[in-house]
Amino acid sequence: MSRPFGAGRSDEERYDDGMAVRREVLSDAHVERSIAGTTDFTAGFQDFITRTAWGDIWSRPGLDRRSRSVAVLTAMIALGHHDEFAMHVAAARRNGLTVEEIREVILQAGLYCGVPAANVAFKLAQRVLEETGDL
């Protein structure tokens, strides 16, 4: 049996790998704002998401970042996590999704997650894409 992905990496290596991926996907500016807002109360959570979400999951070789972005956008629409959805629209563009592909993800999610969810997603995506100069 092969070792699971990432087995044997230290917490520090997972954090460093996660921070690199987090910066590539979300942007240095976003990560710097997150770090600047970290308090003693939230420091453990920031460490956790950097190691786990970014160092363990987003770093896995099984899906490319474009595919991960499609999955994340869909999940955020389905669960109504609007702030995270908006953040990941910009991340999806950095990961190579086109405006047309983002539109198709929202349409597909509308079919399975509901028209109201897609309606909100279109409004949020349009705002983000206008802010980034993509629309």
Image (cartoon, rainbow, N blue to C red):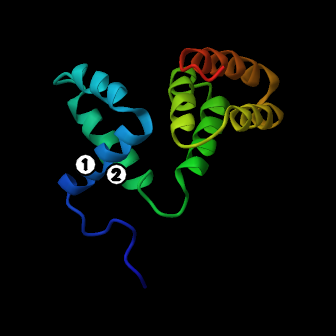
Q: Answer above or below: position of 74 versus 117.
A: below
Amino acid type, mark 1? Tyr
Task: Tell me the quarter of the image containing the C terminus.
Answer: top right
Q: Residue at x 37, y 41 (%)?
A: 22
Circles 2 and 1: CB atoms closer than 8 Å: yes
Question: Taking 109 as reference, is 36 left or right?
Answer: left
Task: Tell me the quarter of the image containing the N terminus.
Answer: bottom left
Residue in front for this viewpoint, 84 or 24 = 24
CA separation, marks 2 and 1?
Answer: 6 Å
Q: Quadrant of residue 75?
A: top right
Residue 92 percent coordinates (x, y): 56, 37
Disc with the residue nearer the chain's start (2 vs 1): 1
The residue wearing badge 1 is: 15
Residue in front for this viewpoint, 76 or 95 = 95
Residue 121 percent coordinates (x, y): 68, 22
The residue wearing badge 2 is: 55
What secondary structure is found at the residue carrying circle 2?
helix
Disc 1 crowd, CA 10 A, few/some/many (<14, 14-19, 20+)? many
Q: Residue at x 77, y 36 (%)?
A: 104
Q: Answer above or below: position of 38 versus 18.
A: above
Amino acid type, mark 2? Gly
Q: Answer above or below: position of 14 versus 40.
A: below
Question: Taking 42 as reference, is 54 left or right?
Answer: right
What secondary structure is found at the residue carrying circle 1?
helix
Q: Residue at x 66, y 18 (%)?
A: 126
Q: Residue at x 61, y 14 (%)?
A: 127
Q: Which disc, if any, is residue 82? A: none
Q: Quadrant of residue 117?
A: top right
Question: Taking 100 as reference, is 43 left or right?
Answer: left
Residue 113 percent coordinates (x, y): 75, 33
